[in-house]
Amino acid sequence: MLAQLRVDDRLIHGQVAVVWTKELNTPLLVVANDNAAKNKVMQMTLKMAVPTGTKLLIRSVDDAIKIFNDPRGKDKRIFGIVNSVSDANKIAQNVQDIEAVNVANAGRFDKSDPKTKTMVFSSVQLNPDELQAAKELAALTRVETYNQVLPSNQKQSLASALKNK
């Protein structure tokens, strides 16, 4: 079961590796990113950031969807990470057994024109394509969608934040 799918520009970093894996009690971390799945240097870097005892899989978005839908993982708690809202939306549209999508840190490092970006949360600034993906994601009533950078932060509803955007 996908306990949480997190959208984070940086994929794995201290907050994710230490704080969130512990908070979610997820021994399996799946990075769903087409670039990382092909880039050996990026894979080595991501592996170095994972705490001892946590298993890491780095897969393309399509391969990650297959893993998330595999019946053998139904009783396992899995923490998924993507770096774009569009990838999170694609996964959420194609995976039924998903508890939540946390749009935590997104859009700050993409190469789109800053003038075209919409600030949804202080840590989330989306270009028009990503904004559309966020709206589609928030419309999924079977999945809780929110922004929560740290577990100590209050969850903020993605749907509510997008109402007038």
Image (spheres, helix red, strand yellow):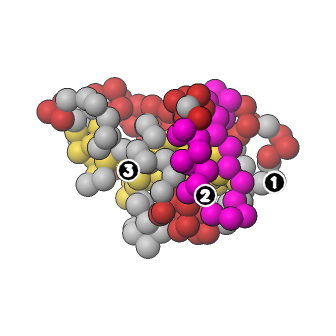
**Residue to which mark 1 is pinned:** 75
Q: Is residue 19 left or right of residue 136?
A: right
Residue 58 included in the magenta stretch of the image: yes
Q: Residue at x 72, y 64 (%)?
A: 53
Query: In the image, residue 143 lies at what x, y percent?
Result: 56, 46
Between disc 1 and disc 3, the foreground one is: 3
Query: In the image, residue 146 lies at what x, y percent?
Result: 43, 53
The reply to whether callout 1 and callout 3 are in contact (CB within 8 Å) is no
Labels 1 and 3: the sequence-earlier one: 1
Residue 141 in sight here: no
Q: Which residues are magenta?
A: 41-64
Label 3 environment density (alpha carbons within 10 Å; few <14, some 14–19, many ≥20): many
Labels 3 and 2: the sequence-earlier one: 2
Looking at the rendered structure, the secondary structure element under dot 1 is loop
**Residue to which mark 3 is pinned:** 105
Q: Say which amino acid is labelled 1.
A: Asp
